[in-house]
Structure formats: structure tokens, C-alpha cells
Amino acid sequence: NSAQSYLTAPLSRRASIAVDVGGVIVGGGAPVVVQSMTNTDTADIDATVAQVAALNRAGSEIVRITVDRPESAAAVPRIRERLDRLGIDVPLVGDFHYIGHTLLADHPDCAAALAKYRINPGNVGFKDKRDRQFTQIIEQAIRYDKPVRIGVNWGSLDQELLTRLMDENQAKGSPMTAREVTREAIIQSALLSAELAEEIGLPRNRIILSAKVSQVQDLIAVNLELALRTNHALHLGLTEAGMGSKGIVASSAAMGIVLQQGVGDTIRISLTPEPNGDRTREVIVAQELLQTMGFRQFLPVVAACPGCGRTTSTVFQELAQTIEGDLRRNMPVWRDRYPGVENLQVAVMGCIVNGPGESKHADIGISLPGTGESPAAPVFIDGKKAKTLRGPNIAQDFQALVADYIEQ
Ligand code: SF4
């Protein structure tokens, strides 16, 4: 539309059906939900409770746990009880593959304790067994009034469906590439499974769909297309995204583009943990993605310049890190004590070139002296110069000013 300017274009969200996952609303215009998954053996109750608690403390609003065998199914109600005793009410999702139908049937306490069941339609069984076993899981969801996520995964795609679509494409003279047919099979697997679940009697507002792939362009294509064909709530995730910065960049690029189109009701960032790595990193990255795009506000923003030849010391980077660490550590308490603290903007700048300007845009900002500048650091509060800090304790003095500002 030539009359529409990018400067004034509103961000709009796709209309999807809201699903209640243990009190957390996914879809229907609700804020995009951050979720994560444990990597403990669910049968190890202590380890799983500790990791669910850590993920929830970091900001995960839903946590998924593997339910792969009778021992883990038996552990689920005990994990739920322990979390409840700790005052942690985060909804738990059971991740089922292959034998989910028998685990749910044999462990009614597990079926009741979970807030949602994740079903992978690619591995509920083959041929005649597939529909029967899928039906059994859906019947448990109806019995316990639980939502399900029908989670299609590129790596475990329904091979019968894929083969049929490949044959049909061949019969038509192969207008689509193998990759395009695979994308179509992922979408159809999700939609046909959702249709079957509804035929069995699961209401539409108990179904979330996901289509996970490992390539950025596939994730964008599949999810935007899926959003055109259904109004089910969508869970986004790039699977096997990779380690370290590669996984973060790939997930952010893919999901950022889909979210920008208004598509996606809940996200999980899947990062391969470094050995002994911190599992909560995936939650922090998900929050940062939603926050940097302006969809949600979880934590105050600390803006810091990148530094350059005008600042040869590392004082300003260290101060920015310290302030951000203080804010993150104190947020669980400050969020209740000082409502709105998550909207705070702090600037920590390295020299006079952009320091005063950027600091004036923040709620509170400091412009540290660059190389050759006089050793004084003006502090700006609510857009006005409020103080000049000098001497060896500039960092601690600014930390105290930020804490004062929050309290006031
Ligand atoms: Fe360099 Fe100063 Fe800009 Fe920071 S504010 S990047 S120190 S010129």
C-alpha cells in the first residue's frame, strides 16, 4: 500500500484461538509466552525439580519435561507436588513419543498432574496403529480436560504422509522440489492431526500446533504458511538450532521474522547446552528476543555503547555489566516492590560524543570520560543533568544512584 509508511505501520498480531495451559494463556492476542524444556532424567525427581525451578526463576512461563518411560511418568505427580510445596506453580508439559498412549493410560496421576500433553504425530505409531494410539492420547486429554500440542518435527516426520505427497508430486510432473514437498508434508501433518483430534472431540481451544525444522528459511516458510491455513495457536521453535552464538542467531533471525508478521503465540529457543552449561540461557535469549523486538518487557534495558579508540579503559563495559547484573538479580523482588521497574532504561556510555545524548534519552544515564577528557562523569536523570561524579568510586556511586532512582 503506497499510502502506508513504515514509520507509522502498526504491529499487528494474527488472530488465533486462545488456549489455557494450566492458567497461562497461549494465543488469542495474549502476550507471546516464553517456554523451555528440561534436560534432566524426569525419573530423577530432585534434579528435575531443581531445573524446573531454575528455569521458572529465570522467566520460563511453561516448562516441558520428557515423559519417556513408566519411571518418569510415575515421577511426574511427585515433581508437581514438590514444586507446589515450593510455591512454584509453573505449568508442566509432558513430552510424549512412541508410547505416550500407554504411559497416560497406566499413570492417571501423571495425566492429571500435567498441564498439557505434547504429541509428535510422526511417532505415535504406523498405519492402523497410528490413528488408534493418537486417539487414545486425545481421549486422555478430553478425560482430564487438558490441552495438547501437536508438535511436528522435521526429524521425525510422518514418513507415510511424506511418501504419499512425494508420489503425488511426481505424478503431477514434479512441480515442487523435494524440499518444498517436505515443507508441505510438515504442514499437512499438523493440520490433519488437528482435524483428527477435533473429530475425536477435543475442542479447538485445547489444541496448539508447532512445526519445527532446523533451517531458518524452512521455519519462516512453514510457519507463515501454517498461519495462513489455520487459526490454531502456534508454538514457534527452531530445532537443533546449534551451539552458542550460532543457535542464538539462527533462532532469533527465524523467529524474529515470523513474530514480526504477527505469527507465533509461544516460543522456545532450543540451544544445545555447552558441557556443564546453564540451561536457563535459552529462557534469557527468548526474553531478550521478545524484548528487543518490543513485544514484551521483562527487564530494564541497559544501553551501552560499543566503545572505540576514544575509550581505552574497560571501566564503562564493566559498569554496564555490573548494572545489568544488579538489575537481573534483584528483579524477582523489585518486580513486586516497584511495579513498572521492567520499563526502566539505563545508559552507560563511554565518552562525550554520544554519552550525554544517549543518557538524556534514558531514565538514568552516565557519560564516562573518554581518553583525554576531564575525569568527570555527568549523570542524567529524566533527561536532565543531575550530578557529576568524580574520583575512584564513580561505578559504585552510579550503582547507588540507579538503586535510589528505582526506589523513588
Ligand atoms: Fe566511542 Fe564515545 Fe561512541 Fe562510545 S560514545 S562508541 S566511546 S565515540
Image: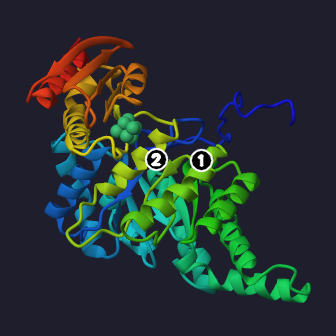
Asked if 353 appears above or below 208 in the picture, the reply is above
Q: Earlier in the sequence, mark 1 or mark 2?
A: 1
Residue at the image position 69 percent from the left and 77 percent from the top:
182
Residue at the image position 17 percent from the left and 20 percent from the top:
389
Front residue of 107 and 384: 384
Residue 295: x and y in percent read 52, 37
* Left or right of residue 11, residue 292 in this image: left
Q: Secondary structure at mark 1?
A: helix
Q: Which numbered dot is residue 289?
A: 2
Residue 328: x and y in percent read 25, 38
Front residue of 127 and 333: 333
Q: Are marks 1 and 2 in contact (CB under 8 Å)?
A: yes
Question: How far is the residue under mark 1 from the one under mark 2?
Answer: 10 Å
Q: Which numbered dot is residue 259?
A: 1
Residue 44: x and y in percent read 18, 68
Count of marks overlaid on the render: 2
Res. 270 in view: no
* Left or right of residue 209, residue 116 in this image: left
